[in-house]
Image (cartoon, rainbow, N blue to C red):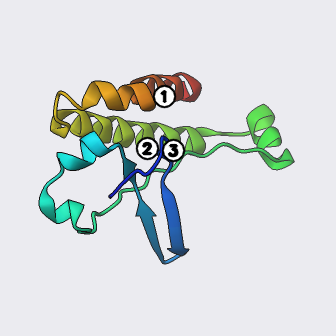
């Protein structure tokens, strides 16, 4: 976790397939509220989620004539994981920082949009 030097809060991703480093940029106000060990560069574990959307002719064939149950199950399971991560995030985020973060990245809105697209 690093302090953002601009209004661009996109993560910075480096590394290789077996070992990624993802730098998450936070606004200064939020960064200052972090525990000292995190501000000093302590690594945090990331938990990826997977969403599957077929885009080629085989997927079109599966959607028309076959079975997309596996894709639907993968998407639903990972949506539930993401909802749980969001819940934990909002519970742990200091109350005075959450509104600022929501202004920058409307996480709740993005999660609701994803839910609509998966249903």
In the rendered image, which quarter contains the N terminus?
bottom left
Q: Are marks 3 and 1 in contact (CB under 8 Å)?
A: no
Q: Secondary structure at mark 1?
A: helix
Residue 78's disc number: 2
Whole-Å distance between the Cαs marked 2 and 3? Answer: 27 Å
Residue at 22% from the left image edge and 67% from the top image edge = 40
Q: Horizontal and vertical percent for residue 57?
A: 86, 46
Q: Check the image and report above or below for 44 versus 26.
A: below
Secondary element type, mark 3 = loop
Residue drawn where x is 71% and y is 45% of the image: 54
Circle 3 residue = 8
The answer to whether 106 is drawn above or below residue 76 in the figure is above
| Disc 2: CA contacts within 10 A as few (<14), some (14-19) or many (>=20) | some
Disc number lying in front (2 or 3):
3
Q: Are marks 2 and 3 in contact (CB under 8 Å)?
A: no
Tell me residue 69's x, y (percent): 58, 39
Would you call the spot at circle 3 few (<14 residues within 10 Å), some (14-19), or many (20 or more)? few
User: In screen coordinates, is 98 left or right of 105?
Assistant: left
Q: Nearer the viewer, residue 104 or 113?
A: 104
Q: Please give the residue where the numbered disc 1 appears in the rendered image.
A: 110
Q: CA distance from mark 2 to mark 1?
A: 15 Å
In this rendering, the label closer to the viewer, 2 or 1: 1
Q: Name which of mark 2 and mark 1 comes first in the sequence.
A: 2
For marks 3 and 1, give the CA distance: 18 Å
The C terminus, quarter of image:
top right
* Badge 1: residue crowd in 10 Å (few <14, some 14–19, many ≥20): few
């Amino acid at each position: 976790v690093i302090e953002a030097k601009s209004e661009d809060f996109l993560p910075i991703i480096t590394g290789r397939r077996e070992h990624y480093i993802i730098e998450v940029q936070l606004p200064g106000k939020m960064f200052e509220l972090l525990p000292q060990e995190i501000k000093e560069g302590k690594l945090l574990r990331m938990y990826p989620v997977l969403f599957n959307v077929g885009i080629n002719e085989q997927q079109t064939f599966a959607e028309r004539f076959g079975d997309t149950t596996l894709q639907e199950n993968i998407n639903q399971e990972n949506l539930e994981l993401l909802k749980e991560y969001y819940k934990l995030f909002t519970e742990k985020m200091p109350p005075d920082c959450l509104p600022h973060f929501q202004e920058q990245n409307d996480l709740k809105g993005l999660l609701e949009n994803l839910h609509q697209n998966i249903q």
